[in-house]
C-alpha cells in the first residue's frame, strides 16, 4: 500500500499504517465518485447507511442528494475528520465495527446501503447485511472485482460457487461499474467493481423451511469444488441417496454443485431431508 514516507524514505506515517492495517483504500478521484453516484441514483427521499465512511468524501455527496445518511466508520481518527466534513449536513455518525454493531437498531427502515468495503472482510459484512431482510431496500457496494463476479455468477460459470448461492438466495446481484486501482488512494493491487444487490432473492419464492439451514447445505455441497456432489454430501446423506436425489433432476452421479442453480440446489436439499 502506498503511504507517506519519512525523511529516511522507509517509514509510513501513522495514518498510512492505520489504512494498511484496516485494508482501507479511499475513493479519492472525484470523477469516479460521480460515476458511482450516477449508477446508484440517490433520490431526495432516500435514507442511506454508509459503511466505511472514511473522511466523508462520498458521505457529503450522498447527504446533498438524499434525505439523511447514517455513516459508520471504525477508525477513530477518521471519525473526527468525518465530523468536520459533514458539519451542517443531516448525517448521523456511528463509530464502531459494522460486524459488531446492533444494525437493526441503527439502520432506519428501508435503508439503502452504500459502502467501499475492505477486501478482507467484504464477505462477512455482506452476509451480515443479507440477514437484515426488511430493513434494507438495496445494497450498493464497491468490492474486489473478483468477489463481485462471484456474487453475480450463473451456474456453469467458473466463478459460480457458494458465495454466488448465498448472494442470490437473499438478493438479485448486478455489476454496475468496473473500477481500476488508480481510482483509489492508495491504489489497491486488485481491480474493483460496484455491485448492486436488491432483495428479495431466490429464497423468497422457493418456500424454504430455513434459509440458513439451506445455505449450510449449499456450503457443504461446494466444500470441495472439484469433487462431485455425491462425494461432498455422502458423509451426511449416503452416496446412494444423493445419487437418487440427483436422478430426480435428470442428473447423473458425477454432477457437481457448480452445475446447479439455487432452485435446483434447494430441491436437492428438500429431497435429501430426512
Image (cartoon, rainbow, N blue to C red):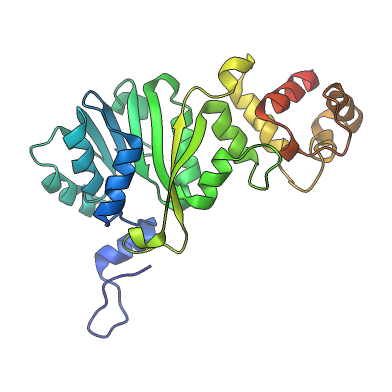
- Counting from the top left corner in percent of width and height, residue 260 is at 73, 33
Of all residues, the one furthest to the bottom in this rendering is 8
- Vertical placement of residue 37 versus 190, above or below: above
22 relative position to 167: left or right: left
Quarter of the rendering containing residue 50: top left
- In front here: 128 or 176? 176
123 to the left or right of 44 = right
Quadrant in the picture for the N terminus: bottom left
In the rendered image, residue 26, in percent from the top left (x then y), is placed at 31, 55
Where does the C terminus fall, quadrant-wise? top right
Look at the picture and state if 213 lies above or below 85.
Answer: above
In the rendered image, is residue 184 in sight?
yes
Image quadrant where residue 83 sits: top left
Residue drawn where x is 18% and y is 42% of the image: 60
Q: Residue at x 21, y 54 (%)?
A: 77
In percent of the image, x 62 and y 34: which residue is there?
Answer: 165
Report the number of numbered marks: 0
Q: Eyeballing the image, is 9 above or below 190? A: below
Place of residue 137 in the rendered image (x, y in percent of width and height, measured from the top left): 38, 24
| Residue at the farthest left position | 88
Q: Is residue 228 left or right of residue 53?
A: right
The x, y position of residue 245, in whole percent, is: 84, 24
State the residue in front, 161 or 41: 41
Q: From where the camera sits, is residue 51 visible? A: no
Q: Is residue 35 left or right of residue 66?
A: right
Residue under the image location 55 percent in, 45 percent down:
149
Choose between 147 and 24: the one closer to the eye: 147
Amino acid at each position: 500500500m502506498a503511504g507517506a514516507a519519512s525523511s529516511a524514505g522507509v517509514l509510513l506515517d501513522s495514518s498510512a499504517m492505520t489504512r494498511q492495517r484496516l485494508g482501507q483504500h479511499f475513493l479519492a478521484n472525484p470523477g469516479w465518485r460521480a460515476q458511482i453516484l450516477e449508477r446508484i441514483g440517490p433520490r431526495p427521499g432516500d435514507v442511506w447507511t454508509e459503511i466505511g465512511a472514511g473522511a466523508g468524501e462520498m458521505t457529503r455527496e450522498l447527504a446533498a442528494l438524499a434525505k439523511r445518511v447514517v455513516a459508520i466508520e471504525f477508525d477513530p481518527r477518521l471519525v473526527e475528520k468525518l465530523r468536520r466534513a459533514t458539519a451542517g449536513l443531516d448525517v448521523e455518525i456511528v463509530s464502531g465495527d459494522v460486524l459488531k454493531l446492533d444494525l437493526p437498531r441503527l439502520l432506519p427502515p428501508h435503508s439503502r446501503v452504500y459502502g467501499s468495503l475492505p477486501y478482507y472482510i467484504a464477505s462477512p459484512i455482506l452476509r451480515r447485511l443479507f440477514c437484515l431482510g426488511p430493513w434494507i431496500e438495496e445494497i450498493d457496494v464497491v468490492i474486489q472485482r473478483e468477489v463481485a463476479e462471484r456474487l453475480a455468477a450463473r451456474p456453469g460459470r467458473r466463478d459460480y460457487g457458494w458465495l454466488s448461492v448465498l448472494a442470490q438466495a437473499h438478493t438479485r446481484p448486478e455489476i454496475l461499474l468496473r473500477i481500476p486501482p488508480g481510482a483509489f488512494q492508495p491504489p489497491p493491487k486488485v481491480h474493483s467493481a460496484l455491485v448492486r444487490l436488491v432483495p428479495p432473492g431466490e429464497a423468497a419464492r422457493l418456500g424454504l423451511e430455513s434459509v440458513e439451514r439451506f445455505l449450510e447445505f449449499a456450503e457443504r455441497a461446494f466444500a470441495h469444488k472439484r469433487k462431485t456432489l455425491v462425494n461432498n454430501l455422502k458423509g451426511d446423506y449416503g452416496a446412494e441417496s444423493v445419487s437418487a436425489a440427483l436422478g430426480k433432476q435428470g442428473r447423473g452421479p458425477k454432477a457437481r454443485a457448480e452445475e446447479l442453480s439455487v432452485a435446483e440446489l434447494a430441491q436437492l436439499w428438500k429431497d435429501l431431508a430426512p
